[in-house]
């Protein structure tokens, strides 16, 4: 698994294929120019020593400010400017644009007069610094009981380790805005900006004036206002200095806090571009914090943090960044960085807005309508709810269609943004699921709110194809997207029966905004419909689909094929096209006379017509050996290049036949595109669309007959290794399989002869199916709950879902405050809200009955479980895993202070106090760093060819560019660091490998989550590099942590567990904990035998590792037994001449000698008693080098000269 961004990367790779060689050279040259110019400047701040700072010409002055505010010795200065030779530098200037700034320049930090805005920022910053950091506690080599192989305990509390000895350090008791604010007019004229009220740790109550000159104590008290300076009067430019003078405890604790903060890794402190929520959280005391309180209320008004008093024009920002120039690398970097920054800001604002809308804090723009139909504007973002308003989707499935339309639309926005055509604009779109509601947040097209939709739309249809209009400019712009998105240009009939040309689906609307830009919106049918889930009268699907019971009725008629499927299908057809042409060319060559040639072409044609469209995978593999394939490629390319003028008619006929056979829209070249309007209700076509219909049926058949089997094959040969629901969904999506096919995938796995080797896939799939069904039910369940009963309702639902307690009863919240006037109408009702207590009547048996029927109707899968315990028993699931999956999917956050007893039959597992929060689940566009990604791919390719050093340089370059676009935290940077660490390790630089991998681990925890499968793998790599650097106990702790997380995420029975246990066993062997080591290694052996088959080489290696430990324990009989097993596997799999077999045979001889020597000694002792002269036996503890060698082998790190170039690199293990 190569990081989360796997499939997005694949899309980008496709668009990069053409002309990439020239681009690469050009890029390399551009990058060299940039790289050479990093330089160092000196910074001089008041009262500190000057220090050096490495900067790059692309950075802004603002970024140096940020560095100073993060440094321990300068962080309390927030109101300053940077000056070069007495000139103040502009915060938003790029360093390269500043005259006279060069290597070694001295920048001075000069304190500035304060203003209200700067004061607020400063207070916010001081407030943040009062918080704490948590350090991990130390543990010894023995693992905790619950992570030993075979343990059934799955505690939750260790998920977020808390430091027991940590005590919060208090610098101040209270820091708040004084009630005397704002300063009266006469004091304003003395320069007073605001008043603060502070209580020190020593319990001294003081009132402070913040003025343009600095901070000083005044004589005001709680009840009397006296702004005169107190006696003795200090005037300090910084609040920290003033507080240090009046409170000794503040001075001491603040210094200690800063030291602690600076000791923490920067990656623990930097913000992530998109908010990551955890499904568990420890209990944290709620402390008083006036700054936080004030922030909460200003953001409620919809003001953004950095521009006081005005809102951001999101649409303008999103579109302007797209218009930035992109001619060369520095320009592209600047553009991508701006796009990414605005997108992450927009996603954050849209999420806050969506929550405010659902929580009832935003006034609707149509308050008179019923709550489901209301729309909202907040902070220049438009919000609508995922309900079928005004029966718009009535024919497509009502509310179910309205729920899925926003995500389809978002996929369309993603696709068009990735193609990135100049002059064509999409809306900023974020889809948020929160408290059972789906909210779509969109940027607003200038002028759209002032006119009716009918007047605005100049392309497309507003009534699903009854009336259709088109526009030449839109056709020209959309034509450019048609090839990459595989959308066919087609004509449809409007209400007057005239043909209208379109190059998208009819729903796609074109609107020219008041800013003159061409916008497209409603992209929900960008990709063609999925006919397996769209029964159409009088249409027969391909036999492959029918055999599996398709077409099936679905909740809505908006089921689309995924973009990944379209790509795979087109690629598959291209191979077919090439094979056809090659076949015919060979036949033509073979036939000498014309009649034979004609006859052959006809038979080839007939053959191609009858050839089954969905080829078996085996045929795909054999395609390279067809003679004439190269000739066919050449012919196809020359035809495409020359419009077919200079090519003889026979060859042209070959291509024509091949084109017909694969359904190409052109007769002279391979070109497959889909018409997304086929089977849309109400859309009529002037032309015959039989071929286009056939293509859709073929694509649907391809999904079930090719893609599902190849996904399962990937899982069987472990090239795809999902560990939880999210990674499984991602693996399905990479193959273009929608999750609605989950039931089919599970049935396919269930009917495989090698079912036992796919048990982990089946189990994860069942868990995913159950939690998704529960999520569907939970969504409607929550909509009927009013805010005050939310935690009671969520805990009741979790009890019904997961607790063995048979009669879970909901505790209706006792009205702590009995309202005097019960019948007052609530002024601002939450969508669908009301005093509704129907949720309280849910019972476990009813919920599980609903889950069964949901599984049957949505996934066409028969679960047959009446309770959670039955499901656990039948499918080998874990309740803690189910809790994690449902919490992540629905945004529930549970508390981490106790263990949940799911299996008690006497009391429910959850109480309402256990539900800490509900957070939003957010979907948005992820803008990409295309140049950086291109370098990353080139680096990977170089490494695969064996050019490690060049690969390493390219990946380092990619890392720089990623950092430039994304900032410091991003999934792709994580993948980059992991690969770099691995390369450092292979090239023998262990300390550097450790350093890079540590960054990868910290980043993975922050951007993916502490128990994400990728994070678990990062821990394993880090443990290996720790071991190589001699940090044995750290390596063990990391492996124990990884094992604990893997147990929570998917349980013990998973192929990855075998690798983890082999690692743990080896390290324990190295530290001479033999019995413990055996427990882990024997578990690894059992799991490997199960998932790789008893005769696999992995199993042979497992036997060898177990034999080594038995040898160290001097139990030679057991050692011999295991090594013989291993030897037999090697002999059968790779033959006697192979070095592995020879090694094993040598080791067997050695073990036999040792066993004989031991036996002799024992006999001697029995015979002569204590007088026996005993030969000393050689019991050797394994050397660290030999343990490391085995660790490298099991982790797939091979040290061999990969090419001539690499011979100069020392590839042996030091």
Image (cartoon, grey):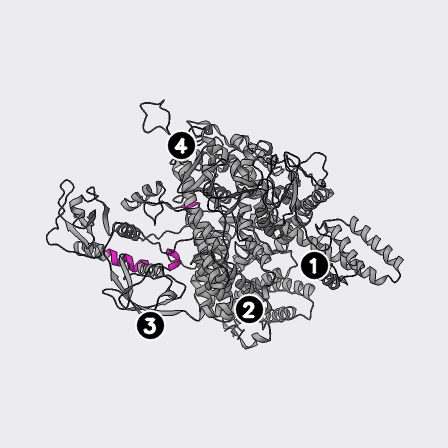
Mark 1 element type? helix
Question: Tag 2, which secondary structure?
Answer: helix
Magenta range is 253-281
Crowding near the residue tagged with mark 3, few <14, some 14–19, many ≥20 C-alpha atoms within 10 Å: few
Disc nearest the viewer among 2 and 4: 2
The disc at residue 640 is 1
Q: CA distance from mark 3 to mark 2?
A: 33 Å
The percent coordinates of residue 883 (x first, y second) are 48, 42
**CA–CA distance between discs 2 and 4?**
62 Å
Q: Pointers 3 and 2 in contact (CB under 8 A)?
A: no
Calculate the distance from the C-alpha at mark 1 to the C-alpha at mark 2.
26 Å
Is residue 78 in sight in this rendering?
Answer: yes
Q: Tell me the element at label 3.
A: loop
Mark 4 lies on a secondary structure that is helix
> Mark number for residue 25?
2
Residue 207 screen position, x and y as percent? 17, 47
Question: Looking at this rendering, what residue extends furthest in the bottom direction?
Answer: 1208
């Amino acid at each position: 698994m190569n990081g989360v961004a796997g499939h997005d990367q694949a899309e980008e790779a496709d668009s990069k294929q053409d002309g990439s060689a020239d681009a690469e050279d050009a890029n390399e040259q551009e990058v060299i120019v940039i790289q050479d110019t990093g330089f160092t400047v000196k910074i001089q701040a008041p009262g500190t020593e000057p220090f050096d700072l490495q900067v790059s010409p692309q950075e802004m002055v603002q970024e140096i400010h940020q560095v100073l505010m993060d440094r321990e010795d300068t962080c309390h200065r927030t109101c300053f400017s940077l000056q070069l030779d007495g000139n103040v530098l502009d915060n938003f200037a790029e360093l390269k644009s500043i005259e006279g700034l060069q290597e070694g320049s001295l920048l001075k930090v000069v304190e500035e007069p304060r203003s209200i805005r700067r004061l607020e920022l400063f207070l916010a910053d001081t407030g943040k610094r009062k918080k704490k950091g948590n350090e991990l506690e130390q543990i010894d080599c023995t693992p905790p009981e619950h992570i030993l192989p075979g343990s059934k305990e799955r505690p939750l509390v260790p998920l977020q380790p808390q430091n027991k000895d940590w005590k919060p350090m208090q610098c101040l008791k209270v820091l708040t805005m004084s009630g005397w604010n704002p300063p009266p007019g006469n004091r304003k004229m003395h320069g007073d900006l605001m008043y603060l009220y502070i209580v020190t740790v020593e319990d001294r109550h003081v009132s402070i004036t913040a003025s343009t000159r600095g901070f000083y104590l005044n004589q005001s008290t709680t009840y009397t206002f006296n702004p005169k300076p107190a006696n003795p009067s200090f005037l300090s430019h910084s609040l920290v200095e003033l507080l240090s003078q009046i409170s000794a405890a503040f001075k001491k604790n603040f210094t200690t806090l800063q030291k602690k903060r600076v000791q923490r890794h920067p990656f623990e402190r930097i913000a992530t571009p998109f908010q990551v929520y955890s499904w568990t959280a420890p209990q944290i005391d709620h402390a008083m914090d006036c700054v936080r309180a004030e922030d909460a209320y200003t953001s409620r008004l919809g003001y953004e943090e950095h521009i006081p008093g005005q809102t951001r024009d999101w649409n303008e920002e999103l579109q302007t960044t797209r218009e930035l120039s992109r001619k060369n690398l520095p320009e592209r970097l600047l553009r991508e960085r701006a796009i990414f920054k605005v997108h992450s800001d927009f996603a954050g604002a849209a999420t806050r807005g969506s929550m405010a809308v659902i929580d009832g804090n935003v006034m609707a723009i149509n308050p008179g309508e019923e709550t489901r139909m209301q729309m909202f504007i907040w902070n220049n973002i438009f919000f609508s709810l995922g309900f079928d308003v005004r029966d718009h989707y009535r024919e497509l499935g009502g509310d179910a269609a309205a729920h899925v339309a926003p995500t389809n639309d978002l996929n369309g926005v993603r696709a068009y943004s990735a193609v990135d055509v100049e002059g064509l604009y999409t809306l900023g779109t974020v889809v948020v699921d929160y408290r059972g509601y789906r909210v779509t947040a969109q940027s607003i097209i200038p002028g759209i709110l002032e006119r009716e939709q009918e007047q605005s739309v100049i392309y497309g249809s507003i009534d699903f194809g009854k009336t259709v209009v088109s526009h030449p400019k839109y056709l020209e712009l959309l034509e450019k997207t048609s090839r990459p998105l595989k959308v066919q240009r087609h004509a449809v009939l409007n209400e007057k029966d005239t043909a209208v040309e379109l190059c998208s689906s009819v729903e796609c609307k074109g609107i020219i905004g008041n800013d003159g830009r061409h916008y497209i919106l409603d992209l929900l049918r960008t990709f063609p419909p999925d006919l397996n889930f769209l029964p159409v009268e009088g249409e027969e699907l391909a036999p492959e689909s029918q055999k599996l019971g398709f077409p099936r009725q679905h909740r809505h008629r908006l089921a689309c094929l995924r973009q990944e499927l379209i790509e795979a299908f087109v690629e598959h057809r291209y191979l077919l096209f090439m094979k056809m042409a090659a076949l015919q060319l060979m036949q033509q060559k073979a036939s000498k006379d014309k009649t034979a040639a004609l006859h052959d072409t006809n038979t080839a044609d007939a053959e191609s017509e009858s050839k089954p469209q969905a080829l078996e995978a085996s045929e795909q593999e054999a395609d390279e050996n067809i003679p004439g394939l190269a000739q066919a490629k050449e012919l196809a390319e020359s035809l495409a290049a020359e419009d077919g003028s200079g090519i003889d008619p026979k060859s042209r006929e070959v291509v024509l036949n091949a084109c017909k056979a694969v359904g190409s829209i052109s007769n002279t070249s391979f070109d497959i595109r889909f018409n997304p309007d086929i089977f849309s209700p109400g859309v009529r076509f002037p032309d015959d669309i039989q071929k286009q219909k056939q293509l859709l049926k073929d694509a649907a058949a391809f999904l079930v007959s090719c893609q599902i089997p190849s996904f399962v094959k990937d899982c069987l040969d472990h090239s795809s290794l999902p560990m939880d629901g999210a990674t499984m969904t991602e693996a399905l999506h990479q193959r273009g399989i929608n999750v609605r096919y989950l039931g089919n995938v599970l049935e396919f796995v269930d009917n495989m002869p090698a079912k036992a080797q796919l048990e982990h896939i089946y189990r994860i799939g069942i868990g995913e199916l159950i939690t998704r069904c529960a999520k569907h039910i939970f969504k409607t369940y929550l909509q009927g709950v009013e805010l005050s009963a939310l935690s009671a309702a969520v805990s009741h639902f979790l009890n019904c879902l997961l607790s063995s307690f048979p009669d879970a009863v909901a505790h209706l919240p006792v009205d702590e405050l009995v309202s005097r006037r019960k019948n007052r109408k609530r002024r601002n009702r939450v969508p669908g809200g009301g005093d509704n207590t129907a949720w309280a009547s849910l019972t476990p048996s009813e919920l599980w009955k609903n889950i069964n029927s949901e599984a049957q109707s949505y996934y066409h899968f028969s679960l047959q479980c009446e309770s959670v315990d039955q499901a656990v028993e039948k499918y080998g699931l874990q309740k803690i895993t189910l809790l994690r999956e449902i919490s992540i999917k629905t945004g529930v956050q549970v508390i981490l202070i106790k263990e949940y007893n799911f299996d008690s039959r006497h009391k429910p597992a959850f109480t309402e106090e256990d539900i800490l929060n509900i957070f939003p689940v957010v979907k948005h566009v992820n803008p990409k760093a295309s140049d950086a990604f291109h370098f990353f791919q080139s680096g990977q390719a170089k490494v695969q060819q064996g050019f490690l050093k060049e690969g390493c340089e390219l990946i380092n370059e990619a890392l720089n560019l990623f950092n430039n676009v994304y900032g410091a935290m991003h999934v792709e940077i994580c993948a980059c660091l992991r690969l770099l660490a691995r390369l450092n390790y292979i090239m023998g630089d262990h300390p550097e490998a450790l350093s890079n991998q540590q960054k990868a681990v910290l980043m993975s925890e922050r951007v993916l989550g502490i128990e994400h499968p990728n994070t678990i793998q990062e821990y394993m790599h880090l443990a290996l590099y720790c071991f190589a650097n001699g940090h044995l106990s750290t390596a063990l702790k990391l492996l124990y942590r990884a094992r604990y997380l893997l147990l929570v995420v998917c349980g013990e029975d998973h192929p990855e567990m075998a690798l983890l246990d082999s690692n743990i066993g080896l390290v324990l062997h190295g530290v001479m904990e033999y019995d413990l080591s055996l427990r882990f290694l024997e578990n690894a052996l059992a799991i490997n035998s199960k998932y790789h088959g008893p005769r696999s080489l992995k199993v042979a290696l497992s036997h060898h590792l177990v034999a080594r430990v038995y040898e160290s324990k001097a139990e030679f009989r057991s050692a011999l037994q295991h090594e013989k097993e291993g030897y037999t596997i090697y002999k059968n799999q790779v033959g006697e001449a192979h070095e592995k077999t020879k090694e094993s045979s040598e080791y067997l001889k050695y073990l036999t000698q040792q066993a004989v020597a031991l036996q002799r000694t024992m006999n001697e002792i029995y015979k002569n008693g204590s007088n026996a002269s005993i030969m000393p036996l050689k019991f050797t503890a394994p050397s660290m080098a030999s343990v490391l060698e085995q660790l490298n082998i099991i982790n797939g790190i091979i040290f061999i000269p990969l090419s001539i170039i690499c011979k100069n690199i020392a590839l042996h293990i030091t």
